[in-house]
């Protein structure tokens, strides 16, 4: 078994700026700024933040769907951004798979479940004959608990519930035997009652197949339940990282504190509600160089408005970017 102490996928100072309103307008959305993330085998890292904070942009850069403006992505220590060739991309996608938020649009309505699962098997050379593909489709459906498999394989997406569709999407991602899964709010569009089942399925995959997960969510309670480590994102910046339990018990960054105050009891409130923090995320085209939370922070100081604080290490497992702790 390979090393669990070395990150399998790492983002270093990953940054994405979008030019909006035409190139000459000079308007730039600073969607992600200096994101540092390390993913490890058999571990779930949650990325938590409100809508518009830059979570999907990070995950899309890690999936190599967007090119970063700057920064590095390392897979097993090797910078993958240097090679955009077809073979390198195919190889990367067989190791790093993405699960999208919307199971209703991620499956092609004209194709049956069987087709969705066979396609990656053929493209990535996991099945050479129809008989082998059939066997593997059967095994994949069993792994995501869509049984009896002969009942689900011939179905079209519209014949499935949201939860069943998301299980097909997970099975499709598993078809290529990935080492990393990037899940972008995988349960937020599902009924509250079935969210737990899908999260539990991902937890089984983490434990049994040693997959590294990045779990993106706006629900800090589900992050506590499912993730070993949680990163908190605000307006393009990851502002705090800690073990999920310690983060919820003792949030350090003023934004994390605000986020948690919106959840009455994160343990009991688990997945039963979607919450919204009071106040707006700042306009990302108008953000200055300072701390993005300065306009809402009860502890704001003059220097907070001038320059973004650097990360301060608080312990072996925690850090934050805030002048209250260093920076
Ligand atoms: N392709 C794009 N072009 C321009 N702006 C974008 C694009 N994708 C995302 N953004 C902007 O980047 C910011 C972060 O978006 P996103 O990563 O989708 O956040 P989240 O997933 O946390 O809701 C938002 O202001 C969004 O409008
Ligand atoms: S850096 Fe300043 S404004 Fe930002 S969270 Fe810390 S105290 Fe508040
Ligand atoms: Mg998103």
Image: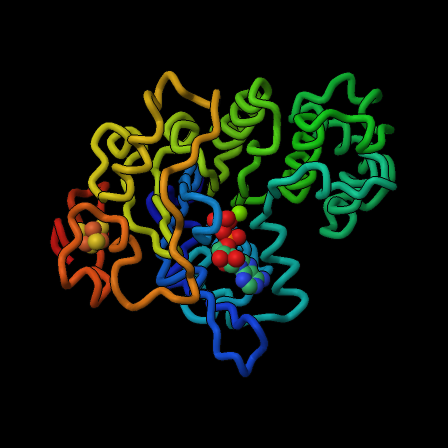
Quarter of the image containing the C terminus? bottom left
Q: With 27 as the anchor, is 87 left or right in this view? A: right
> Image check: 161 left or right of 88?
right
Judging from the image, the colouring scheme is rainbow
Which quadrant holds the N terminus?
A: top left
Q: Position of residue 127 (x, y in %)?
A: 77, 43
Looking at the image, which residue is at 59% across and 20% down? Answer: 194
Q: Position of residue 21 (x, y in %)?
A: 57, 72
Which residue shows up at 53% across the image and 33% down it? 209
User: For this view, does 180 lie left or right of residue 231?
Assistant: right
Q: Is residue 36 above or below residue 68?
A: above
State the image quarter where residue 323 is shown.
bottom left
Q: Residue at x 70, y 23 (%)?
A: 142
Camera-nearest residue between 59 and 138: 59
Nearest to the observer: residue 269 or residue 22 = 22
Residue at the farthest bottom position: 24
Residue 312 point in image, percent of width and height: 17, 53
Location of residue 176 by image quarter: top right
- Residue 32 location in percent, x, y? 42, 60
Number of numbered discs visible in the structure rendering = 0
Residue 153 seen anywhere in this rendered image of the structure: yes
Position of residue 287 relative to residue 282, above or below, is below
Can residue 320 be seen by looking at this rendering? Answer: no
In terms of depth relative to the viewer, which is nearer, 78 or 222?
222
Where, by quadrant of the figure, is residue 192 drawn?
top right
């Amino acid at each position: 078994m390979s090393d669990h102490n070395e990150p399998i996928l790492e983002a270093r100072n990953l940054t994405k700026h979008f030019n909006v309103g035409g190139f000459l307008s000079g308007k730039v959305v600073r969607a992600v700024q200096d994101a540092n993330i390390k993913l490890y085998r058999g571990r779930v890292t949650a990325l938590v933040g409100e809508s518009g904070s830059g979570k999907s942009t990070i995950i899309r850069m890690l999936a190599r769907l967007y090119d970063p403006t700057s920064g590095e992505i390392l897979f097993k220590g090797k910078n993958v951004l240097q090679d955009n060739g077809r073979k390198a991309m195919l190889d990367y996608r067989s190791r790093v798979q993405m699960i999208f938020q919307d199971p209703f649009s991620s499956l092609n309505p004209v194709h049956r479940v069987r087709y969705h699962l066979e396609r990656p098997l053929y493209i990535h050379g996991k099945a050479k004959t129809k008989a082998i593909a059939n066997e593997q489709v059967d095994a994949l459906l069993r792994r995501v608990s869509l049984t009896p498999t002969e009942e689900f394989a011939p179905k079209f997406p519209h014949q499935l519930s949201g939860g069943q569709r998301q299980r097909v999407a997970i099975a499709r991602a598993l078809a290529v035997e990935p080492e990393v899964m990037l899940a972008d709010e995988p349960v937020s569009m599902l009924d509250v009652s079935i969210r737990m089942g899908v999260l539990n399925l991902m937890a089984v995959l983490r434990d049994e197949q040693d997959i590294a997960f990045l779990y993106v969510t706006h629900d800090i309670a589900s992050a506590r339940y499912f993730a070993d480590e949680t990163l908190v994102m605000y307006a393009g910046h990851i502002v705090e990282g800690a073990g999920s339990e310690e983060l919820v018990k003792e949030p350090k960054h003023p934004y994390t504190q605000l986020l948690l105050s919106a959840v009455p009891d994160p343990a009991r409130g688990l997945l039963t509600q979607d919450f919204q923090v009071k106040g707006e995320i700042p306009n990302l085209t108008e953000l200055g160089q300072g701390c993005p939370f300065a306009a809402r922070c009860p502890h704001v100081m003059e220097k907070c408005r001038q320059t973004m604080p650097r990360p301060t290490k608080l312990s072996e497992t925690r850090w934050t970017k805030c002048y209250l702790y260093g920076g």
